[in-house]
Image (tube, rainbow, N blue to C red):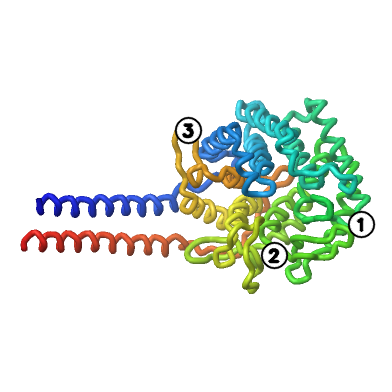
Amino acid sequence: MIKTLARIVVGGAYVLAILALVGLLTCNLRLYVPNPPDPSSKRVAEEVWAELRFLRHALDRGAGKDMQQLFPEGAFFSHVLYGLAWVNVGLQSAPDSPERQQALSEARWTWETLGTPDLLRPFVRARTLSPDYGVFYTGWRNYLLAGILLLQAPAQLDAQELTIFEEQCDQIARALEANPTPFLQAYPGASWPVDTFPALVSLHTHTQLVDGRYDPVIEAWMESLHEHLDPHTRLLPHLVDYRTGRQIQGTRATSQVLIVRFLLDIDPDFGIAQYQAFRARYVVYLWGLPGVLEYPQGVYGQTGDVDSGPLIKGVSLSATAIMLGTSRVYGDVTVSDAIWHAGELLGFPVRYGGMKRYWLGQMPVGDAFAVWSKTAVPWLESIPRRTYHPIIPWWWRIPLNGLSLGIGIVIVLMVRGIERVVCHWKSE
């Protein structure tokens, strides 16, 4: 009886140790998965297809509604980012390829869902709002429609889609001309500067697809934008008074990381300058991992909110995930590759049934942000060919490898210790 019990104890210890060691090995191997294809290569990472399959599967089963319970625009983002990821895939595929046609089909499906009652419900159609339903809803939806048109042959644009696109561009342009500041309302009385940027990319897309009738609006908007930078960071503020442009809340990463991504397709020179300034003050190497601070370096004591999520030593996980895409479109390979690999470590990806999901598929909106970032590519401009000052050291994985090795040695020593104790117990 005693010998049997001893064998069970030792055997159980070995099983647990093996599982722990396999887990450590798996985590370390994830840090060395192949680098993603460079956006300029026009190749899509193989795993992207599996992630898109999971997202469509989840959205068909009501994941958007589930995410709406957690975030103010959870349902909208879950859908629109899925469609935008497909636009990115299509732009990196040959014009007549099956991949381009599938991308166009999925992006169109997404655009239709954005007009359904469930997706419209959080947005208000008030007389004080221009464009209709606020610039967040109209801007992102028109941005997706711009992408759908970019996937089509210039001489064969769908007439109905083009008509809707031009109508929405007119709404946006009129709203910008009538507003005393460059920042439109997303909801009655509330304006986050980031929400106007997708709308501006759609106007700039009109210039490429149709004509330059909105160029004066874009130029005036850019001039006004320079007058409303945060005096402390020289970046755009997070929250403002839409009537006066008065800053209510200074620069924050969750909005700025999106702003600089959109800026590349509006004003590349200004976008590069803003990206470099943002990168210098917000991107950090912390505890062996890359991250993006929600507030500028040197600002302490701030807490997270619904936009940023919980902060870990000031780092916003949501801003870090979005930074993957932003750094890709600016050709900042060191940062984008480090965030890509860190995501494979911390996101606990699971792949089965031809689908890949993070966090066991319990947070599809996170998967949507991830795949939109992984597929990121400029729509209207080229990737800047620049050399960036290194922030993430080339050896950033080594401390994590060393920590894992140390934990592994401790596990082995503990098992051997248990075995010796049990053997001594059996001999008595």
**Residue drawn at x 63%, y 28% as measured from the top left:** 102
- Whichever of callouts 2 and 1 sits on the residue coming sooner in the sequence is 1
| Residue farthest right in this picture | 178
The Cα atoms of the two marked residues, 1 and 3, are separated by 51 Å
Q: How crowded is mark 1: few (under 14 residues within 10 Å), some or many (20 or more)?
A: some
SS for dot 1 = loop
Who is closer to the viewer here, 297 or 75?
75
Q: Which residue lies furthest to the front in this view?
A: 1
The x, y position of residue 150, in whole percent, is 74, 35
Circles 1, 3 touching at the beta carbon (< 8 Å): no
Q: What residue type is labelled 3?
A: Gly
Write down the residue under mark 3: 354
Q: Distance between the residues labelled 2 and 1?
A: 27 Å
Query: In terms of secondary structure, where does tag 2 sit?
Result: helix
Could you tell me how many numbered marks the image carries? 3
Residue at (63%, 39%) from the top-left corner? 64
Say whether residue 45 is left or right of residue 167.
left
- Measured in 3D between alpha carbons, the distance from the residue under mark 2 to the one under mark 3, in whole angstroms, is 41 Å
**Residue 180: mark in rendering:** 1
Q: Name the image quarter holding the C terminus.
A: bottom left
Q: Is mark 3 on a helix, strand or loop?
A: loop
Q: Would you say 264 lies left or right of 350 here?
A: right
Residue linked to disc 2: 277
